[in-house]
Structures are given as C-alpha cells and as structure tokens.
Amino acid sequence: TIDNGATWTPIPMDRVSSQTFQATIPGFQEETCVSYKIVAYDYAGNKAENNNDNSYYTYHVVPEYSANMILAMFTLLTILTIIFTRKRKRQQPIP
C-alpha cells in the first residue's frame, strides 16, 4: 500500500525452493512510502498474515543516482582534492 492501508495491491509470490517464496514489489516514484504485509493461504484455504504486529513493513523510495552522476561527483571531488593539495604545498615554507 502507498496510501496508509486504504488500498492493498496483492502481488503473487513464486516458489523458489521447498520453503522459500519470493515476489518483487514494483517501483514507485522517489519519496513514496511503501508498506507491505505478507499473506499466505494453505491448500485448505487457511490464511496466515504477517503484518509486523499491525505496523506493517515499511520503506521509503530514495532517489537513484545514475552512473553519470556518480562519475561527475567523483571527478569533482578529485579536482577539489588536487586544488587543495597544491594550494597547501604552496603555503608551506621552504626549508
């Protein structure tokens, strides 16, 4: 849910081993608060729900940084380090 539990979107899980199931929550826009719970049914139709004691499991979508953005930040940091190092060497007295 992204609306504090007003609506829920069921996502089927796939069995990946004898006791392990997995599903993928679709992507949402950054800053979205996503809450989820796990609901399972056995062959007799009995329901089990894990909702973290009614607090649900929650995460916030954070912005993704592209490889170009990371490269630009790394380049800027490298340039600033070089400038600072050279400036510092010039200020040291000659023995």
Image (cartoon, rainbow, N blue to C red):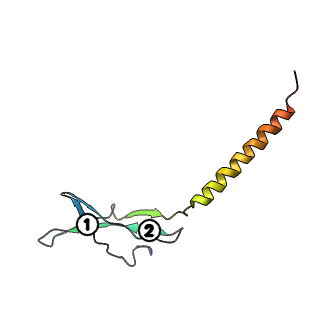
Percent x, y of residue 90: 86, 34
Look at label 1 and name its amino acid: Asp
Residue lying farthest to the bottom in this orientation: 7
Q: Secondary structure at mark 1?
A: strand
Percent x, y of residue 33: 48, 68
Q: Are marks 1 and 2 in contact (CB under 8 Å)?
A: no
The residue indicated by pointer 2 is 34
Identify whether 76 is placed above or below 89. below
Residue drawn at x 65%, y 50% is 74
Left or right for 63, reference 41: right
Left or right for 77, reference 66: right
Separation of disc 1 and disc 2 at Cα? 21 Å
Q: Secondary structure at mark 2?
A: strand
Left or right for 14, reference 77: left
Query: Is 51 or 24 nearer to us in this picture?
Result: 24
- Which numbered marker is on residue 14? 1
Identify whether 74 is placed above or below 3. above
